[in-house]
Amino acid sequence: MFITLLTDFGLSDNFAGVVKGVIYAINPKVKIIDICHNIRPGDIFQAAFLLKSSYQYFPPGTIHLVVVDPGVGSKRRIIIAKTKRYYFIGPDNGVLSLALGTGDQVSNIVCLDNQNFFLKPVSHTFHGRDIFAPVAAYLSRGIDLVKFGRPQKKYREINFPQPRIISQAGKNRKALEGEIIYIDRFGNLITNISREAFEIFIAKKKFRISLGKKAINRISKNYLATGKNKPLAIFGSYGNLEISVSCGNASDYFGASKQAKLRVTA
Amino acid sequence: MFITLLTDFGLSDNFAGVVKGVIYAINPKVKIIDICHNIRPGDIFQAAFLLKSSYQYFPPGTIHLVVVDPGVGSKRRIIIAKTKRYYFIGPDNGVLSLALGTGDQVSNIVCLDNQNFFLKPVSHTFHGRDIFAPVAAYLSRGIDLVKFGRPQKKYREINFPQPRIISQAGKNRKALEGEIIYIDRFGNLITNISREAFEIFIAKKKFRISLGKKAINRISKNYLATGKNKPLAIFGSYGNLEISVSCGNASDYFGASKQAKLRVTA
Amino acid sequence: MFITLLTDFGLSDNFAGVVKGVIYAINPKVKIIDICHNIRPGDIFQAAFLLKSSYQYFPPGTIHLVVVDPGVGSKRRIIIAKTKRYYFIGPDNGVLSLALGTGDQVSNIVCLDNQNFFLKPVSHTFHGRDIFAPVAAYLSRGIDLVKFGRPQKKYREINFPQPRIISQAGKNRKALEGEIIYIDRFGNLITNISREAFEIFIAKKKFRISLGKKAINRISKNYLATGKNKPLAIFGSYGNLEISVSCGNASDYFGASKQAKLRVTA
């Protein structure tokens, strides 16, 4: 049995280590895998995006534990959602919603309110240790989902902005406007434009992708397809259009940050 | 069997990985858990504080290995301490002392001098690899504590500064003066004032917590209890008084760093 | 069975976590150990150096997976090399060569081209997930090396610059000139001068090690052997001459970066 961790705990404190200690103390046989602990503090969107891009690669039955929880200690709910292949545990603040909304059908949701599975006393500030960890550990020991709390029908949703077709001032042709939703460590700019949306819009015509004052007019198949330090567009591992710089850092090159807009015209 | 690691190795080199390799080569069945590798180089206080706040969450029998060892290669001692529930291995520079001083009674201490358990040759600079790792691994295989060296009665102690009651210039009332002893990744300022010390001092009266030019006059139960970007005081997961900023970073907000003083008046 | 990971994925995205998910989904019994994920993006030299300094500490049979792969998606080859005690998987860009060139004899090399072991579809940008991870996992399940592709005789090599003996302008005596090849988290400057090369050159005479405008004329046995914040030379855990500062950071002290030259005269 596997438990993954996706948190904003960082790696400079003992938070992730203590959560693992609590889990292993309850279920010494489980295996814990870090997805990422460096989510920007409280950044629910970033965590939701990474969870959606990660969960399906893990063994069936894996419990995905997400602790990005700016409302810790307040009345916000914590939920466990069971899908066809996985379990998800997290605050009901939308952080699970992108994963739950993609393919792997949700069969049950429970609002975590049975305090018998919590460490005592429960602190006001570290529910990762006192609630999330022990609950994930007991769940991994095979305790039935219904024991953890009362059923709940829905989960809170967040949505990334969708790309949209817009008119351009003084021009006849419409444009597909998307935005940067994620920037990885290599500086690659991941957009919200899926391959499908892109292909439908350009309809096999010549196209132009504009970001800031720069434009790209072809899709590359790898990072070396243009000259060194030249920008390129590529469909990356998230399935979306990405803007990169060959052997370089597109975020630096374009001076672009999250939410920057880009346009496709054809 | 579990071995935890708490070091100042950082994550940009291969130090932690190599230590794990050495351990698994000797005991492939053990499980290794990272508590933290980002202790500030040589910061014995920070490591001692995190160890004290972590060790008790791990399964009984866990071996806690601490390598924050600015004296590596000199004549400083390395010790193994057995308590009721755990083992602790570290340089005898005080890094174990806050954990050993809290509750879980020390039953035996051994000064690590049996070189049969070391990797050969022992380098001058990486005892984590050449001494600590193999010793922890052999200990996890059940080798008797007394085999590792001669008994030792005491361990070197460090102490965090204690809060103290002080007179205030030109004022009648005394104040409880504490200080910031730790700052976490979220910028929360952890003080050395325990809940007990706080409650005894204020004796149910109205109070005022002063840090720099700002003051707080209530204890919050969660980070959302005040308005966004407003400061608050809370008893955090370490059991001590913490100063935070709702949805923000108290370290930035107050411009406060470790050892900054704060005052409680009632 | 063990698989190690050495990559430039960093720890701020989900790359390393997803690679682990893919591996565990194929072989839930394997143990995965992180050597380092913070290789500078695309820095083949740094990864090759750390691999060479790490691989031999792991249990025999360990599979060392290295993903530092600036040519991802292009026609570059991926290889699996079997040595007497280990397996190595990586792009054939030289990143494995320092490890393969040191002692543990290479018995077989295979060019990874059997796509049956890949995740489908293979992305253009994340072969760590789609090719390296599943191949390592299947290899750890005992699948025969020859199944993964056709045999290959050689692997691409890189070499660190070797120290050399040079004449000094206006001086009679020759010098041994080396350079800084690695800087660790503590700021220690690791040179390419091995203990053997050093000892042969100085031939038991008095010596002087010059770096920038500073000079050191003895070898220390530990970091405390000189006064606090004083520079020192030491043979470190990599087996080479290192320049350090007692209780300080030599990289800051000397303002030295990688490729900086240093001289030994005797």
Image (spheres, coloured by chain):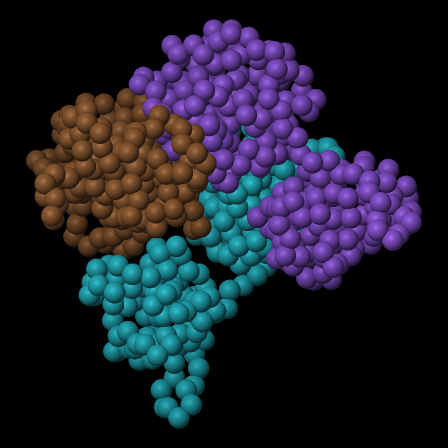
Chain colours: A brown, B cyan, C purple
Examine the image and state in which quarter residue A215 appears: top left
- Is residue B47 something one can see in this rendering? yes
Q: Residue at x 65, y 41 (%)?
A: C181
In the rendered view, does B188 fall on the left or right side of B137?
left
Rendering coords of residue C218 (x, y %)? 82, 52
Give x and y (percent) for residue C254: 67, 57
The residue drawn where x is 61% and y is 34% is C49
Left or right, A25 with reference to B86: left
For the residue pair C157 and C215, the one nearer the viewer reads as C157
Q: How many marks?
A: 0
Residue drawn at x 56%, y 45% as measured from the top left: B9
Question: Which quadrant holds residue B231?
Answer: bottom left
Q: Is residue B257 above or below residue B203?
A: above
Image x and y of residue B2, in percent:
49, 34
Q: Is residue A44 visible?
A: no
Q: Is residue A141 left or right of residue C153?
A: left
